[in-house]
Amino acid sequence: MRPNHTPPTHANGGQPPTLEDLPLSTFHRLLTVRSGGGSFVDGYVLSIIGVGMVRLSAALQLSSLWQGLIAASALIGIFCGGLIGGPLTDHFGRKRIFFVGPTLFIVFSLAQLWVNGPIFLFTCRFFIGIGVGIEYPVATALLVEFLPRRHRGPRLATLTIMWFAGAATAYIVGNMILGAGGAQGWRLALASSALIGLALLLVRIGTPESPRWLLSKGRTQDANAVIRQVYGNTYSTADLPELPQTRKVSLLDLLRSGYGTRLVFVILFWTCSVIPVFAVYAFAPKVLLALNLHGKWAAYGSIAITLMFVIGCVAATAFINAMGRRPMLIQSFLWSSLALLVLGVEANGPSLVILLAFGAYAFFIGGAQVLQLVYPNELFPTEIRAVAVGCGTSLSRVGAAIGTYLVPLSLDTLGIAYTMYAAAAVSAVGLASAIILAPETGSLNLAEAASLDT
């Protein structure tokens, strides 16, 4: 599919601008849907477990230990999937690996219909997590390597909006299925993600390979063919502002090359932004019950908080270029930390105050959430981009898995107030990492943003 615009020229009548200077086209919008669809499924499959947790815990007679393990199982899978997803994406190409995640979603979502114990369910969720972990490096790398410069931040941020939209859909659809599905409704709710996985698989058919990846493998002729197919015959690899190096890169190479500090920053801020969020999504009903929100307050509260996450991400996406990456990350962590602190102080307060504080956290953490997929893809060059994103995904999920596992134990032993204080402390660490390490990349092209000399 070719863009629906005429190739522009410079004001002086010279050569056309680079591919990063072109306006957004129909192809870019379709690719955003194809990549964002993965984020939608990710949000759905990781959140639907929170919807069914109370019912399935009763049906399978799960202890607090097993509840934590099952909630964390997908995060453990993400850790493994991220570690293998980056190298697989760099070795086999973005296009081939683009279909692995949806396949895993379909197979192991359907397998949950026959769950007969905690080990079986843990296994299904683990492999779903592997699919999610693979999605992060492949979907974001493919998208960023096609996007025009000024649309790079907002379009990558859109993937985070899609994640929360998927999570909101999981709570809405999941509660509808639980209401109509009877005693086994939780099985149908967990398996419902197979339909979304199938839709994602079908919409991705016809996606081209990344010209930048082809160039990194020395396949210049194939790269030119893709560029002509997408942009028209007037363009070629010469119109790319960055020519990737043809070399193999391991994690050790990544650290030795001078990108270690950037990787530490990505892991730190990503971890601190996801630990409270995953804990909320995995145990939202239980957390709200602990905060004395019962019945309809708890059900409506879960949906309202999820919608606030979406609104926060939409607002952050709208201002990401105008506000800048670094200021947005700092402000996001600052105000979300304060909101969690209020939740700890007002743990036994009025229901309305609790919902407002939860809503404030959900809104303000949107800035850090959208930057999870922006910073990693901007701070590393093509030949190590997928590896870096995969490492960031995996290592950030270690903390998220531990945090999610500890939530039910913390609620049972320490109580809701100290659990919220702990979440506020995690966000405060994220704030410190942003102040000390966050760079500003908004005005740079992809090569400049990834350069260590910038």
Image (cartoon, rainbow, N blue to C red):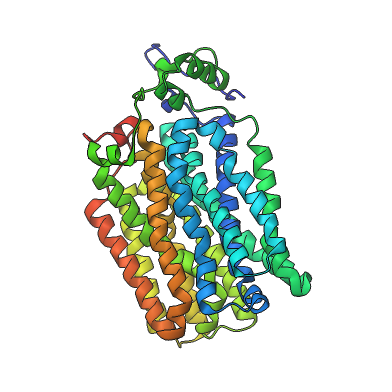
Give the left or right position of residue 71, taking residue 244 as reference: right
User: How many marks do you count on the picture?
Assistant: 0
Instruction: Give the quarter of the figure containing the C terminus.
Output: top left
Which quarter shows the N terminus?
top right
Query: Which residue is drawn at the image coordinates 45% and 31% (left, top)?
Result: 91
Instruction: Identify the residue at image location x=75%, y=71%.
Output: 184
* Image location (x, y in percent) of residue 294: 60, 84
- Residue 447 at x, y percent in the picture: 33, 30
- Can I make out residue 388 in this image? yes
Q: Is residue 447 left or right of residue 312?
A: left
Please tell me in which quadrant of the rendered image residue 429 appears: bottom left
**Residue 146 shows in the view:** no
The residue lying at 25 percent from left, 61 percent from top is 432
- 337 is higher (above) or lower (below) than 160: below
Residue 77 placed where, x, y %?
50, 55
Quadrant in the picture for residue 433: bottom left
Residue 400, given in percent of the width and then of the height, sits at 42, 62
Q: Is residue 25 above or below residue 17?
A: below
Left or right, 211 with respect to 418, comes to right
97 above or below 297?
above
The residue at 55%/39% (across/down) is 32
Query: Quick one: 307 or 384, which is closer to the camera?
Result: 384
Q: Nearer the viewer, residue 141 or 57?
A: 57
Near-viewer residue (397 or 449): 397
Measured along the vertical axis of the image, is residue 383 above or below residue 258? above
